Every structure is written in C-alpha cells, then in structure tokens.
Amino acid sequence: MRVSFTIMSVYMKDGIGLSGINLDIMQTIGQFVMQLRTPWVLAGDWNLEPETLRAAGWLHCIGGEIVAPAEQTCAKGMGSCLDFFIVSTALSPFVVSIETWPDAPISPHSPLTMVIGVL
C-alpha cells in the first residue's frame, strides 16, 4: 500500500509568541495547506507551548491537530515542550506515537520521532 503526504518544516521566532513574524508564518502555512490534496505534517520548533497554539483557534482554520510528546523537548530555562507536530485531521487517526530523543547530541532541543500506522 502506498500512502502520500506532504511534510513541512517550521521554525517560529523565539520570544515573540503569537505576534509579528510568527503570525505571518502561520498565515502563509495556512494558505499553503489549504491548497494541498494530500494529508500533511508540519514538524517544527514552534517556540510556543502546544496549549498556546491550540487556544489561538488556528488549528481549526487549517484542519490540523497537534501531536506532541508528554515530555519536554527543550532543556533551555525550566524546560518546555516547544517541538511537536501538527498533522492534518485526515492523518491524525494514523499517528501511533511520538518519541523524544533526550540523549541525542543536539542541544537544547530534542529530536522527535513520529510513528504512523497504516492498514
């Protein structure tokens, strides 16, 4: 069985939250994903907690769902979850798990693995 989906990488500017260039990035992403004919994945350093992005209402507008690990992904400061995936609602039922790699030789962010299961 073949499955096609589009993967995009996202980096939001640190320290400005949902303002300025970050809002511009979100608008551009939204316009792009609305044109796609395949399910999609946005993987990135969002520099926002998942709850902040959920509360913005943007996910509903683009037809996406956050898939984030329970663990922190950024060791900077007190530690937080800033790295996660947003997947199209068509793909979200197939997400099996998200794993962090806290011992990876990359700092301060941990790489993530998303496991997708298809029939």
Image (spheres, rainbow, N blue to C red):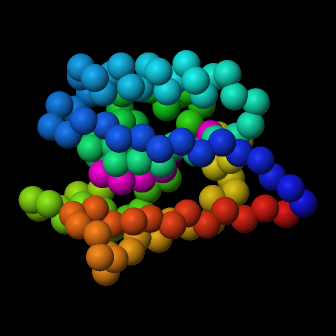
Q: Position of residue 102 (x, y in %)?
A: 32, 75
Q: Position of residue 76 (x, y in %)?
A: 14, 60
Magenta segment main secondary structure: strand
Q: Residue at x 40, y 70 (%)?
A: 100
Confirm whether the magenta stretch covers residue 87: yes
Q: Position of residue 41 (x, y in %)?
A: 58, 45
Q: Among all residues in the image, which is located at the extreme left?
A: 77
Residue 100's place in the image compared with 66, above or below, is: below
Q: Quadrant of the N terminus?
A: bottom right
Q: Residue at x 77, y 47 (%)?
A: 4
55 horizontally vs 114: left or right? left
Residue 4's place in the image compared with 102, above or below, is: above
Q: Residue at x 33, y 66 (%)?
A: 110
103 horizontally vs 8: left or right? left
Residue 110's place in the image compared with 86, above or below, is: below
Q: Nearer the viewer, residue 88 or 103?
A: 103
Q: Among all residues in the image, which is located at the extreme front?
A: 105
Q: Among all residues in the image, which is located at the extreme right?
A: 1
Q: Among all residues in the image, which is located at the extreme bottom?
A: 103
Where, by quadrant of the figure, is residue 119 drawn? Answer: bottom right
Where, by quadrant of the figure, is residue 101 drawn? Answer: bottom left
Q: Residue at x 60, y 28 (%)?
A: 33
- Residue 115 in view (yes/no): yes
42 horizontally vs 108: left or right? right
Confirm whether the magenta stretch covers residue 79: no
Q: Position of residue 35 (x, y in %)?
A: 67, 22
Magenta span of residues: 82-88
